[in-house]
Image (tube, rainbow, N blue to C red):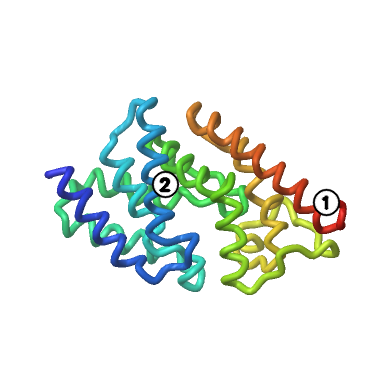
Amino acid sequence: MNESLVVNKTIAFVKEKLAQAEGGHDWFHIERVYKNALLISHNEVCDVIVVKLAALLHDIADSKFNNGDESIGPRIAHEFLQSQQVPTETIIHIINIIENISFKGGNIDSTFHSKELDIVQDADRLDAIGAIGIARAFNYGGYKNRAMYDPDIAPKLNMSKEEYKNSTAPTLNHFYEKLLLLKDKMNTETGKKIAEERHQFMQQFLSRFYAEWEGEK
């Protein structure tokens, strides 16, 4: 397998598939996760081609935009990788990563574990926090026509997978239901270090948001 050629073809494939995607889950999201994954992988012993391809294909068909169907993304990724003559063992590993990367309310115990999953999962979670995470949260909230904030609707913690998927809560609730929880769910030392700073930025944003909401600043 010509790894460089496969990566380049995968990039072209993903760009085409996500050309009309929602702004927080488009090619630029994939590109940021890819860069994050490469950064983290420099400090880990791992199969870099698995990390690269999994990062590029992890959101090829996000279930949020496919009526909750979690099988579409892995199937598209599998068919594409087969068409590129990627070894079966590598394909299986990548598909396992795609199937186990999501937050899903934070209460799902995965039965699959690998260093490559740790890396790509951290890379994806980093893109959900900090300045980019804030922008993505409100972009998606606008896409779904959700309120920014409603003081009368409290965040709901410890949701089941189905509750999390079906939530229509205001965007600010998402910070407490997911984004602020990610710092403590990072797998790698590099991921933890970057997440700490991004977490602090989100806390500063929330403090300012509430102050402005109340007319204090």
- Which label number is shown at residue 33? 2
Task: Answer left or right for 194 relative to 201.
Answer: left
Q: Secondary structure at mark 1?
A: loop
Q: Residue at x 36, y 59 (%)?
A: 74
Mark 2, mark 1: which one is toward the viewer?
1
**Residue 186 locus on image (x, y percent):** 54, 36
Distance from disc 2 to disc 1, alpha carbons, whole Å, reads 35 Å
Where 86 falls versus 146 (above or below)? above
| Mark closest to the chain's N terminus, 2 or 1 | 2
Q: Amino acid at mark 2?
A: Val
The quadrant of the rendering that contains the N terminus is top left
Q: Residue at x 32, y 44 (%)?
A: 93
User: Residue lying farthest left?
Assistant: 2
Q: Which residue is mark 1?
A: 217
Q: Secondary structure at mark 2?
A: helix
Where 64 falls versus 120 (above or below)? below
Mark 1, other Cα within 10 Å: few <14 / some 14–19 / many ≥20: few
- Which label number is shown at residue 87? none
